[in-house]
Amino acid sequence: MAATRSTATAALALSRTLARRRAAASRRIPLELSAPRGTNPFPLFPTSQSAAFSSTTTGDPPPQTMDSPIKVVSHIGGSGGGVEGGAIDAGRSARKPLSLWPGMYHSPVTNALWEARSSIFERMIDAGAKTAAGEENPQPPQSELLTKTPAGSRTSIVYKFATDDILREQYRDPWNEVRIGKLLEDLDALAGTIAVKHCSDEDGTTRPLLLVTASVDKMELKKPICVDTDLKIAGAVTYVGRSSIDIQIEVTQVDQDSDMQSDPIALTANFTFVARDSMTGKSAPVNRLSPETDKEKQLFAEREARDKLRKRKREEQKGVFENGINKLHAEAERLNGLLAEGRVFSDLPALADRDSILLKDTRLENSLICQPQQRNLHGRIFGGFLMHRAFELAFSTAYAFVGQRPCFLEVDHVDFLKPVDVGDFLRFKSCVLYTQLDNAEQPLVNVEVVAHVTRPELRKSEVSNTFHFTFTVCSDALKNGLKIRHVVPSTEEEARRILERMDAEGLFD
């Protein structure tokens, strides 16, 4: 009986499969996988240090009829120019080792930027292979530091939103503006490309440096970024330390009827990268920087002063024990001031201020398993992807807190504390850390997002990244009587985090 039922089931399944195939054939729309036609849709031109990105290929494809196959086009590969000059062979991607391939998740701009510097990472993998094989003379490190100018690393990208429907749809948010989270990925990839250009010694016999994002400082949105108008992002190195590189990127809306250079700046961002020896993992020196123009010299002086301030702050923290009693007393008073209202919520909830809310009641959280599609050229999870996910959670946190769609103002600071690997169990935890209501026309909502790499097998969790964002609300909502509530801590740990962030704001402003 069992054999009879099994045979009947198999026959029924086969009959249904054949019926589906006959129905598909009657519709005459077969599915076909194909590679993109024509040239690479996202070329990078290192000779002009500029690139224009479009999702279309050379030549218009013929109109598709009902009898034409539905084409699923892959955007892998292409003939983008390399960082070191020369064209990248379109077929070369097929010959790269799998470990070199970045993930498939990323935007066309990020993919093209990575393709442009893929030759440098091929040299890095070759050096590792030689060392693993026991060769006596692997690629040596750079023997002499060069002096470069900001112009040598300057790179710009133009998004053809006005004419490219597909590219525009990839970046559109529900309010017809550019998705900030997706733009963060491209900014991180562009900053990495700029850092690679500055650190390159143009010598194919030396092993390249390993450059990683250390922090993002004061990414400020000056006006909404429209998705129907061409967009330009451009950046260059502004300052270098012994092993650190500061990069500033500006985002401008491109008006086709006026000079691109005169367009108002929509967003500015400052990235800091650190250099490591790709073989030993130790700190490595980077090429020197010689600013030329007045603006370059001004930016260099500003970043140098900020670097000295940070070093002085670190020295002051080392000497905390000399004035330990006084500092601890002052900090205790500040903590008590913050915790006073929180204690009312805990002990006398009926008498608590209705215009305030406990910090713990603003929390949101999401989790994910880091996938191979989200990795970068180093095989680890792309920092831009982490910023994208953190921004989306921060936006949702502000949205739930305010009750109206929030308006993004700035990324206050981002720290990359530990690398995140493929397969990691990553948890993002967010909260409204504090609000600033002094300016009734533009109240500020400060959101903190902390990323944790969690290892259930080891019963262990480590902080990998911290993100701080600032949002506000539109003026129309305020005119209609919308009020933003105060956020108060209920524990000493929450109060300390608030104080640390407020103190840091004084440092990073």
Image (tube, rainbow, N blue to C red):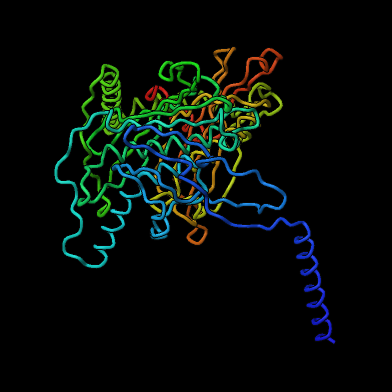
The one nearer the camera, 503 or 11, is 11
Residue 162 position by quadrant: top right
The one nearer the camera, 491 or 157, is 157
Q: Is residue 364 left or right of residue 214?
A: right
Residue 232 position by quadrant: top left
Q: Residue at x 71, y 55 (%)?
A: 29
Asked whether residue 85 appears in the rendered view, the answer is yes
Q: Residue at x 37, y 51 (%)?
A: 89
Where is residue 230? Give x, y as percent.
51, 26
Give above or below for 432 relative to 484.
below
Q: Residue at x 56, y 55 (%)?
A: 34
Locate the C terminus and report the quarter of the image it occupies.
top left
Q: Residue at x 44, y 48 (%)?
A: 78
Where is residue 146? Give x, y as percent.
17, 37
Where is residue 335? Give x, y as percent.
48, 27
Q: Is residue 508 left or right of residue 143?
A: right
Where is residue 301? Give x, y as percent.
26, 21
Counting every numbered tag in the picture gives 0
Locate the N terminus and report the quarter of the image it occupies.
bottom right
Asked whether residue 321 appears in the rendered view, the answer is no
Q: Is residue 73 left or right of residue 206?
A: right
The single residue placed furthest to the left in the displayed view is: 144
